Amino acid sequence: MMDQAAKILREVYGYTEFRALQAEAIEAALAGRDALVLMPTGGGKSLCYQIPALLGNGVTLVISPLIALMQDQVRALEQLGVAAAFLNSTLDPSAERDVIDRLLAGELRLLYIAPERLLKPGTLNLLAGVRLALIAIDEAHCVSQWGHDFRPDYLALGALRETFPGVPRMALTATADARTRAEIVTGLALDNPSRFVGSFDRPNIRYTVHVRTDARRQLLRFLAERHDQAGIVYCMTRRKVEQTAEWLISQGFDALPYHAGLPGSARSANQERFLREDGVVIVAPIAFGMGIDKPDVRFIAHLDLPKSVESYYQETGRAGRDGEPAEAWMVYGLADVVRLRQMVDASSAPEQQKRIERIKLDALLGWCEVTACRRRALLAYFDEQREADCGNCDVCVSPPKTWDATVAAQKLLSCVFRTGQRFGAVHVIDVLTGKTTPKTEQHRHHDLSTFGIGEDLDAGKWRSVVRQLLVRRFLKVDAERYGALVLTPEARPLLRGQIRLDLREDAAAPKASRTRRPATGAVAPADQPLWEALRACRKRIADELGVPPYVVFHDATLREMIERRPRSTGELLEVSGVGQTKLERYGDPFLAVLSEFPAADPRLPASSDPVEEPDATRDLF
């Protein structure tokens, strides 16, 4: 069976070998065993159930939480010649009836469905008359209250064990620590599952976190060399999404907003432009991107802090799915710490859930302030140990400095205490720096012993101290008193001088680079005309089919065409990403383009210019 799986990988998907753990997961499914599959975003999880679906006797049911996720995968499968469909609210009655007819006739290999739709009695009755070969539960972390995207409907999926006895189930996710993985197995009632836990490392992504000073100016500096790249900018609120998109447009970027408050037609149009066109920047809240399999997203920028390490990892994982270099860039500051802690404390969630959210938020804040390799700390959160520093994060590239902040912290904590633990950071810093304001006069805080004792540091430095004391739990935010700073029990030994405190020194904002970086995955200048011709051919075919260009071929496939210069269908089939179905559908147009650009004969000089004799002294200087 695995020989047949390898043949499908080659002929249908156009790849010569499986990635890490894919073969093992496929073998478990074919053997009828339950499985838990944990692979990073872009790691090829979908092949773990798609290939068994093509080998099994029956239909593979894929449970997916998002409509966009279903539509994107079905669209890609159809271009591979695979019989797949989805059942969701976007189908009109006629289209839905057609899917059901194909399902009952045994014409479908994969059926995608949301958990809410699946659990309806009518759907279960329909599936009772269908032979199921495998049940794949995607985004399985949604079953866990320790997961970052808990959905109560997933809890009911454990009943599938009794509803469809003997049908193997495969739970898949990209983000789950050890506790979440255990809860997935329990919540879905997996039967002694095989566990396939791949590396969480995405070595092609560079992680960078800056303290927020002027967010727009910092973002503009980051984007200065990325005008022609696709990316996602994440914001906390809808209003900020729209304002940021408008501002980026004014700065010359092809930017589009995307959020739930936009009309459905506008959301769909903006999403399609992002998928089909090059260099489009989407500004969106965190939900955008789930299920969007766009491989060439070159950067993810966060203007606001996510709520957990899992959320951050999933959002940044939408960059560089093609394996090419990508960047995850974020700014954050004191306001993020205060706001997110207030949101958790003020929520109506059960206290146990709020405790979980506080723990996860604290883990993310701690990660933001690390002074050692950022990638090693990120992987350690998911229980994966990396022995060496990565050399591809801001901390490795420019290690932060630390300073002895013991006395400064004692001054600030004393000031919080003497002002009654009733005020936010702005007022406490005003008192520390000796700034007379209506509020300091109203409360006679200019008479306190702590008034002006912090004049040696400016307000920005004090904000950094407050932020890091909050992160380290020497201070907390009281949501019931409008964000007042309050001392925690951990502050006592610090105030008494029993411990020393070293804090991270916020780096000055870097100056904009004067030199333009080479474009990611750039082809040689001599091959640029062929590159553009291949992209134009791909775009023309994609527009005719109504699909994004990457559904036809990824950029990496086009670059390999340039390197190999195939002249026949046999040679084109050797290019990674070209399977038999795509060869039959698209091979001739691409071969026609390639025939117009013959490769240079390596035996001939590159031009008719005189060949310069080597200078024996040149290498000495």
Image: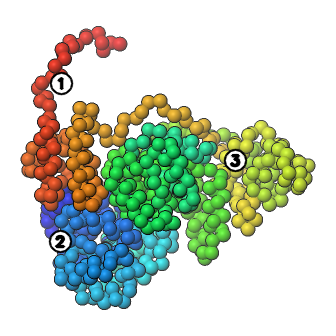
Q: How far apart are marks 2 and 1 (CA)?
A: 50 Å
Check disc 3 and report its element: helix, strand or loop.
helix
Check disc 2 and report its element: helix, strand or loop.
helix
Q: Residue at x 9, y 44 (%)?
A: 567
Residue that carries the numbered disc 2 in the rendered image: 55
Give the amino acid at mark 1: Ala
Residue that carries the numbered disc 3 in the rendered image: 463
Check disc 1 and report its element: helix, strand or loop.
loop
Nearer to us of marks 3 and 1 is: 1
Residue 562 rendering spot, x and y as whole percentages: 20, 41
Residue 57 rendering spot, x and y as whole percentages: 17, 78
Q: Residues within 10 Å of mark 2 (few under 14, many from 20)?
A: some
Q: Residue at x 25, y 68 (%)?
A: 50
What numbered label is drawn on residue 606?
1
Q: Distance between the residues labelled 3 and 1?
A: 60 Å
Q: Is residue 69 left or right of residue 605?
A: right
Give the amino acid at mark 2: Leu
Q: Which residue is drawn at 64% across and 62% down?
A: 341
Dots 3, 1 in contact, CB < 8 A: no
Q: In this view, does 557 lie to the left or right of 430?
A: left
Residue 172 in sight in this render:
no
Give the amino acid at mark 3: Arg
What numbered label is drawn on residue 31?
none
Residue 74 rendering spot, x and y as whole percentages: 28, 68
Image quadrant holding the N terminus, namely bottom left
Nearer to us of marks 2 and 1 is: 1
For marks 3 and 1, the one nearer the N-term is 3
Q: In this view, does 277 lie above or below 289?
A: above
Residue 262 in sight in this render:
yes
Image quadrant holding the C terminus, namely top left
